[in-house]
Image (cartoon, rainbow, N blue to C red):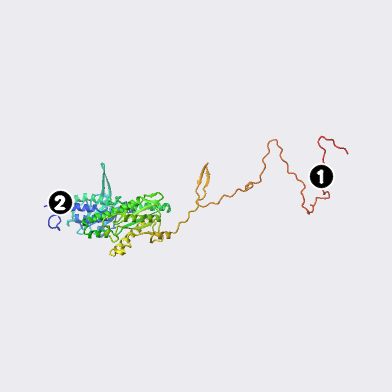
Amino acid sequence: MASGWSKLFKRADLTGGEPDLVVRLLDAVASILQGAQEEETFREIRAQIKEVFACDDVSLFFLSDEKPSPDEGEWVLRVRAGFGEGNRVTQADARAVPALVSGKRLVASDFLTEKAVLKAVALAFDEDCFYGCDIENKKVVLLKNPTPEDDMGSGDLSVLAIPLRHQAKVGRVVEKTRVGVLVLYKTPVRRDLAELERPLRSVLAHAVVSSRCQLRDPVTGLFTESFLKEELGRQVNLFDLTSGKLMGGLVVGHIDTLHLYRQTLESAAKVDPAEVSQRVSDVLRGVSLCVQRRASDHALGAGADYKCGYVGRIGHDDFGVILPRLSAFELCMWGGRLAKEVIAHPFQGEEMLPQGEVTVTLRVIPFGAHGAHAPEAIWKLGKDALEEVAREQNRLRNDAAQLRTVVNTLLALGPEGRWVAPSELSKEQGAPAAPAAPAAPVVTKVAGLDLVDDVTAATPPPRPPRKGPPSGAGPVRPPAPGPGARRPGPAPTGPTRRPAGAPPPAGPGPASGPVKRPGPGPRPGQPQRKG
């Protein structure tokens, strides 16, 4: 016989002895914590909670990043997994229907029942306490911290909202963060069941937060998919701010026929089936090691080494690499060397694969290519390309000759939005234009400082100096005489010479005639001659 608190968890549908609740609970917690990605963690929470608490279904409400409208309050909860996926609950739902208060039974209706369920979820998140909603016998009642005495006769609770809080103890302070609400439908109302729900909700909060905040994948050592998406947004923003001067791109890769590798190992008699998962994990780690090595140590030539790539895991068989500051041609060169490095890496049992070795299929997406301007669009292009590669390889898995044509391939997104070979990419892009000769710097002086401004456009050559006075300066005047000096008189006017053959000018009257040159006058100091 079971004794103590565990006797209340006896399952009537099981025969052959009472189940050990502790074992089932630990198995459920282990399965939840083993989820490598957020979606897998959500699926495990739903499946395991339904098994442990014997409820009909589960909904996982989590705090959303979307900005609420002014009439919705300060936060928004959205169902990420379970029943009603995609539904929303806002802070305004906690204040809806003022007549619906805890412990007051009202006549049930479709509108009142829906508002009671939403209000229970909103109050559980807002007040950090358990809330329930029981709907029986055409009555609906909202319950705060429900107990077995609150049951209206059926032995279960229609809705039980359990707030999820992430707690971290730092010294004497316990830091708390609101994560979401776990909602159980048609769950038994038992006093000791609540004692199990309280510690379990902390485990669930840690499992959800760890999958969201984890920086690196524990198996491959690569960055997680969420971090890779955030870094892609930052790099694309730098590309936009510099108008494409800071080049770069995203390279996504798929480990070819990894599912065939697993099936081959399982069917091989010389391989223990228990070691298949270990061999597959070794392939994942080996490929990730090659990718990390190439992203952190890639020779560009002339003594320049590239060491700033970001490598992350995408899904199960895929990976992505963000390579800032590389052109489309350099991205393709990087992918070609990575493919050769993966082929050279030894893997156990790879000789049994159709292609005879573990290979990777790569797709190159340069920033700014056709349809690759926003980070969301670039990420979607990469995911769609990986899914297409997986579907094509799965379709041709039974034809070894055709399968070899779709593995170990390298394509790049061309300017027209289609996947092309690296050689065709250079043809479509054309030869780069020759850079213009740098213009002469323009020197200016401001407040006694010599400033040199770079001129991008070509400037005309300087004009040669003009002879004579500058325009607008007027006639050139002689320097003023010094003190005591005689001022020069007017220029002497004499007879003008007439050109040969020209008639003499008309005189003023009869007295006009040839002008007689006066004789020499007496010199100073000589007597004047008489008559």
Quarter residue 185 falls in: bottom left
Frontmost residue, 333 versus 1: 333
Q: Position of residue 314 (x, y in %)?
A: 31, 55
Q: Is any part of residue 5 visible from this angle?
A: yes
Q: Position of residue 132 (x, y in %)?
A: 22, 53
Q: Is any part of residue 190 visible from this angle?
A: no
Q: CA distance from mark 1 to mark 2?
A: 154 Å
Is disc 1 placed on a helix, strand or loop? loop
Frontmost residue, 4 versus 445: 445
Residue positioned 26% across, 48% down in the render: 166
Q: Position of residue 238 (x, y in %)?
A: 40, 51
Q: Residues within 10 Å of mark 2 (few under 14, many from 20)?
A: some
Q: How many numbered discs sit on the rendered protein?
A: 2
Is disc 2 placed on a helix, strand or loop? helix
Indicate left or right for 508 with 190 as reference: right
For the C terminus, the quadrant is top right
Question: Which residue is denoted by mark 1 in the rendering?
Answer: 517
- Among the two numbered marks 1 and 2 on one chain, the one whose residue lies closer to the N terminus: 2
Q: Amino acid at mark 2?
A: Ser
Quarter residue 278 falls in: bottom left
Quarter residue 408 falls in: bottom left
Q: Position of residue 72 (x, y in %)?
A: 32, 54
Tell me, for residue 468, which label it has, or none.
Answer: none
Indicate left or right for 51 with 412 as reference: left
Determine contact: label 1, label 2, CB under 8 Å: no
Q: Amino acid at mark 1?
A: Arg
Question: Which residue is denoted by mark 2 in the rendering?
Answer: 6
Q: Which residue is the extreme one toward the left?
A: 1
Q: Residues within 10 Å of mark 1 (few under 14, many from 20)?
A: few
Frontmost residue, 128 versus 36: 36
